[in-house]
Image (cartoon, grey):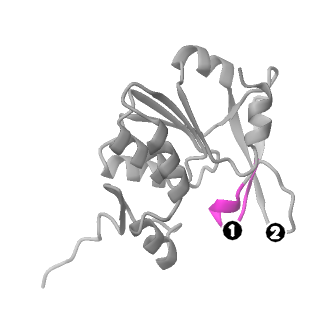
Amino acid sequence: MTVQSPPTHVAECMGVKVPPSPFLNETRIARINEARYEGQEIAGALSVVGPSDRVIEMGAGLGIVGAVTQLNARPEAMVSFEANPNMIPHIEALYALNKIKTKIKLHNKVLLTDPEPPETVEFFLRNSFLGSSLTDTDKRETEAVTIPTTRYEELRTSFQPTVLLMDIEGGELEFLRHAA
């Protein structure tokens, strides 16, 4: 009798292997395999990022957009932010499986441009990670968690980004209000 090992990955998108996680269902796996999951975001990233770029990714989600960008465009440096603490172990597993853990620095923080940002903010978790957000505006059930923040100006000065990839569920305008 042979014991079968669990699969190392359940989906693949543009060379990025996606490990199993509770955030994947059959529909999402099919969309990932067909390169339709976050397809516009991936296409946009690959059309602007090159080997000399320094990329900030905000709203990493499952980690697929950043991983596809890293593996295919090979930017010089990349830093990624994801506010949802439940996603972090799964993003780290995806980065490890694809041997890019040292190429993307992942933070469970919210990057703010406000000149006087608070040290923490509330982030609202919803049943679907896709709807989790800094705003609690609808009638869906949420769970508020406190997330540390970091200042964009400090990162801008030290990291010197050339590309910003941002999918933060409606928070884009607020971020851009104070961005230099």
Q: Position of residue 78 (x, y in %)?
A: 46, 32
Please, is residue 122 above or below residue 4 in the view?
A: above
Residues 143 and 130: in front is 130
Query: Which residue is the site of mark 2?
Result: 140
Q: In the image, what residue occupies the spot 29% across and 71% down?
A: 6
Identify the amino acid type marked 2. Arg
Dot 2 falls on a residue whose secondary structure is loop
Magenta extent: 123-132
Residue 39 located left or right of residue 113: left
Q: Quadrant of the N terminus?
A: bottom left
Return the residue found at the far top: 157
Residue 145 located left or right of residue 20: right
Query: Which residue is the site of mark 1?
Result: 127
Mark nearer the N terminus (1 vs 2)? 1
Q: Quadrant of the C terminus?
A: top right
Q: In the image, what residue occupies the spot 82% across and 51% down?
A: 135
Return the residue found at the far bottom: 1
* Residue 33, image quadrant: bottom left
- Calculate the distance from the C-alpha at mark 1 to the C-alpha at mark 2: 9 Å
Judge whether residue 126 is colored magenta: yes
Residue 8 located left or right of residue 166: left
Q: Position of residue 160 (x, y in %)?
A: 53, 18
Residues 82 and 165: in front is 165
Residue 109 located left or right of residue 134: left
Judge whether residue 139 is colored magenta: no
Question: Few, some or many C-alpha atoms within 10 Å of disc 1 (few <14, some 14-19, many ≥20)?
Answer: few
Please, is residue 126 above or below residue 119 in the view?
A: below
